[in-house]
Amino acid sequence: EGVVPRKKIRIREYPEKSKKINLEIKISSIEGRFKTSKEIDKLNFKKIKTFGYLDKVYGICKPIINVTYSREYYEYKKSRFTFDRDIFYTSLNGRKILDSCNVFEIKLSDQENIEEYINKFGLKNSRFSKYCRGVNSIYFKYK
């Protein structure tokens, strides 16, 4: 978390929207942030869950945690907001933990200033990684 360069490989399901399954790869580097998203079918999803994903840099990457949550979407001016609640982390052996926190995320357009929202709504800017919190909760904190 916070280290550059880094790569996040995840499979994302949208059961409430279209039942789509996407393979997403997010890269953060000194050059900027980049994201690719490719829809995959259920067969490829099962293969990746069972055998892992072959990445050119990291080799075979196997899933270690499943993160689920309820998300609400909002818009204000040109900005989008998401509110995530009921965040659950589940290990591969079935151990399930509910996070005590909710997440409110602001997704600004290029022209907007984050300070406006921080001042207007009394927000505090912070990092929040569901993945890191889940791995720490499942594998380290409660062992």
Image: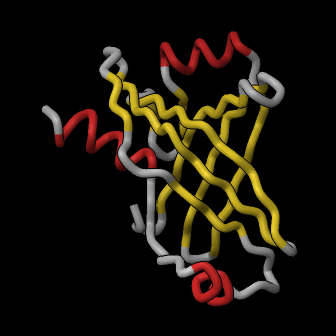
Residue at 70%, 46% in the rendered image: 72
Does the rendering let one see residue 60?
Answer: no
Residue at 53%, 32% in the rendered image: 68
How many numbered callouts?
0
- Occupied quadrant, residue 54: top right
Residue at 46%, 29% in the rendered image: 66
**Residue reaching furthest left?**
143
Q: Position of residue 126 (x, y in %)?
A: 45, 71
Residue 89 sits above or below residue 57 on the image: above
Residue 91 sits above or below residue 51 on the image: below
**Residue reaching furthest right?**
77
Does the rendering let one see residue 62?
Answer: yes
Q: Position of residue 94 (x, y in %)?
A: 34, 16
**Quick check: 121 left or right of 38?**
left
Residue 104 sits above or below residue 78 on the image: above
Q: Position of residue 21 (x, y in %)?
A: 72, 27
Q: Position of residue 114 (x, y in %)?
A: 65, 83
**Quick check: 93 left or right of 127?**
left
Coloration of the structure image = secondary structure
**In which quadrant of the rendered image does the C terminus lie?**
top left
**Quick check: 94 left or right of 41?**
left
